[in-house]
Image (cartoon, rainbow, N blue to C red):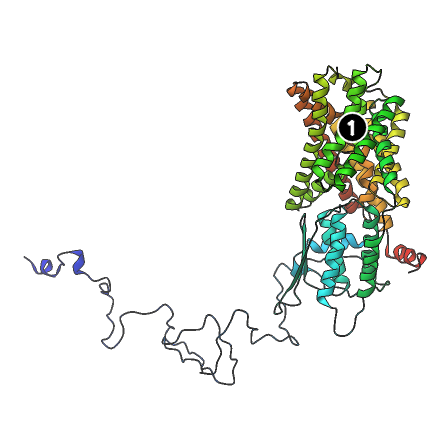
Amino acid sequence: MTDAEDRKPQSDEARSTFTPPSGVAAPADGESSTTSEFALPEGLAVPKTTGTESETTSEFAVPDGLGVAPPQPHEAEGSAFTVPSTYSAKQPPAAFTPPSGIPLVSLTRDVPWQDRMRTMLRMPVTERPAPELVQRHDEAGPAVPRVLDLTLRIGELLLAGGEGAEDVEAAMFAVCRSYGLDRCEPNVTFTLLSISHQPSLVDDPVTASRTVRRRSPDYTRLAAVYRLVDDLSDDETHVSLEEAYGRLAEIRRNRHPYPGWVLTGASGLLAGAASVLVGGNYLVFVAAAIGAMLGDRLAWLCAGRGLPEFYQFTVAAMPPAAIGVALTLAHADVKASAVITGGLFALLPGRALVAGVQDGLTGFYITASARLLEVLYFFVGIVAGVLTVLYFGVQLGAKLNPDAALGVSERPLWQIGASMLLSLTFAVLLQQERSTVAMVTLNGGVAWVVYGAMHYAGDISPVASTAVAAGVVGLFGQLLSRYRFASALPYTTAAIGPLLPGSATYFGLLGIAQNEVDSGLVYLTQAVALAMAIAIGVNLGSEISRMFLRIGSAEKRRAAKRTRGF
């Protein structure tokens, strides 16, 4: 055996993993053979801590025993929530400017507060401009909990009235900024509102929330809340917290502008106008009105008994369908389909549908899902009520003709008048202010003229015609709301009434009741497409008006304030 073979280890275990490779000098006998990754390199001086220096230490300080002088005994352990020693509220360090610069934000004062607040809400918190103190308070500053409570109460009324989630957040943000609260983050869902305020990066945040349990489509109350927010956002109208609470309590106590019997009559007129819109005559108008009023009274009775809205819609859908089936069994020379369609027009949840699609298009997906689910439940309730009556009618021998949908007569003047009457009665059912009823009635007539010109005269598909007409409604509604510095809902929701897919819904249900499932599903699919076209058209028209048009300047707004006595 040679000398090289004598030096070669017999196995891998004979070599230690800590043995230095060949050519590397071994450490001295007095030194440790292992080193730490926290050890400082040779030649690097470490400053010694003294009692006069800051008592805070860094989380990245070198541990004891690694060649660094230990901290003094009186030094406190550093915390992630401890204010840095270099920070001073009176002399803060210079802000860091990124190489690409900070984008310039243009927020002019000659646009409505809704647009300014919406623009800031879509910005990161660090890039929002400082709040402009509009409402005066004492030197101690605003009472933060009371401001947040006022903000939540205002948001509750807006959300309960049917306003979209983005507009509710904009109103809440405007209230907070009017009282000088910066770093506010409102959050709106279908049933819960919350808002968080953090004075600075080193202060504890304040968070409050409120639950919305009841909803009622009262657009008069909605307009009053918008006027309150408008006054709070105005730099010439100073409203204290006490005055704001007083006005809010007065808004809550206000009675509805229309009594119950007027609402019942409006429901009947709406159904009668819808029946004329789809080809009915005088007898059909009366029959549809009677059926809708009976359904409205039954729904009020169920509401008084505490039944959920699902059963209220189910019961309200039965009388118009029953009257249509009874006229068919009596062999009366009327269009029973027009009677039932008119009753459905008074029940279709167009308001909730538009709000749900609008929330989805603006990024509030949770709220949009909840609203659309609510619409689905209401629609299922209507389907259950109508299908029950139609099933028994078919069993009794009623000859209901699904092909009657193709025989709608074109009567432009009658249809325009019926569409305007439908919009007017829809506005009454939504409890709108009397000053807005005329404008929304005109808007509904314009919508039907656009739809009729495209569908009947231009032979364009009903979905495309409905989308364009709804876009006109959204555009005009947004212009009117900007001119009045109010919400756009009172000017758009009632105007889309003539465009609702009542006839497609009825013939879809009739096909299912007569075991013609294929044709029924085709009509129901068309009804869904029309409903989506309405909602998307309204939202698109509103966005177009916000992007390209500026209605209302600061001078006109101040003049209007002075005219109203403010």
- Which residue is painted at 91% across and 45% down in the image? 435
Front residue of 200 and 272: 272
Front residue of 118 and 145: 145
Q: Position of residue 160 (x, y in %)?
A: 74, 48
Q: Position of residue 299 (x, y in %)?
A: 77, 36
**Are there few (<14), some (14-19), or many (20+) residues within 10 Å of tag 1?**
many
Q: Position of residue 105 (x, y in %)?
A: 72, 57
Quadrant (top left, top right, bottom left, bottom right) of the C terminus: bottom right
Front residue of 245 and 181: 245
Quadrant (top left, top right, bottom left, bottom right) of the N terminus: bottom left
Name which quarter of the figure residue 174 lies in: bottom right
Whether residue 486 is visible here, answered yes or no, is no
Q: Amino acid at mark 1?
A: Pro
Name the secondary structure under disc 1. Answer: helix
Q: Which residue is mark 1?
A: 319
- Which residue is painted at 67% across and 36% down in the image? 377
Up/down of 224 relative to 261, above or below: below
Residue at the far front: name it: 305
- Which residue is painted at 78% across and 33% down in the image? 468
* Count of picture labels: 1
Name which quarter of the figure residue 337 lies in: top right
Residue at the far bottom: name it: 51
Q: Is 206 left or right of 439, judged from the image as shown? A: left
Front residue of 232 and 114: 232
Up/down of 10 relative to 375, above or below: below
Whether residue 136 is visible here, answered yes or no, is yes
Name which quarter of the figure residue 341 lies in: top right
Q: Position of residue 427 (x, y in %)?
A: 85, 40
